[in-house]
Image (cartoon, rainbow, N blue to C red):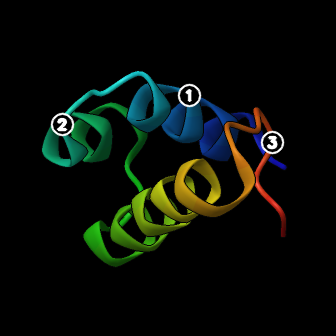
Amino acid sequence: MSKQTRRAWDMLAKGDEPEAVRIATGLSKAVLDAMLKDIQHQRRVHGWDDEPEF
């Protein structure tokens, strides 16, 4: 996982707005939306996990 992706994951996981994360990391809105969906899925189904399951 790149530093940029890890930073975005951490920011989204702590509750930062996707638009703020997009500005800070330069990742696309589509990528951030998918990442946020994955974070929500992991919280709901698997319990909190610090690492995304790529």
Q: Residues within 10 Å of mark 2 (few under 14, many from 20)?
A: few
Return the disc, 3 or 2, that comes first in the chain's sequence: 2
> Which image quarter: residue 11?
top left
Q: Is residue 19 left or right of residue 33?
A: left
> Which image quarter: residue 2?
top right
Return the disc, 1 or 3, that comes first in the chain's sequence: 1
Q: Residues within 10 Å of mark 3 (few under 14, many from 20)?
A: few
Numbered circles on residues, count? 3
Amino acid at pointer 1: Asp
Residue 31: x and y, percent? 44, 71
Q: Residue at x 28, y 47 (%)?
A: 22
Q: Secondary structure at mark 2?
A: loop
Q: Residue at x 84, y 70 (%)?
A: 54
| Distance from Cα at disc 3 to Cα at disc 2 | 19 Å
Q: Residue at x 83, y 63 (%)?
A: 53
Q: Is residue 53 above or below residue 6?
A: below
- The answer to whether mark 1 and mark 3 are in CB contact below 8 A is no
**Which disc is residue 17 wearing?**
2
| Distance from Cα at disc 2 to Cα at disc 1 | 12 Å
Residue 37: x and y, percent? 43, 67
- Label 1 sits on residue: 10
Q: Residue at x 53, y 56 (%)?
A: 44
Q: Secondary structure at mark 3?
A: loop
Amino acid at pointer 3: Glu
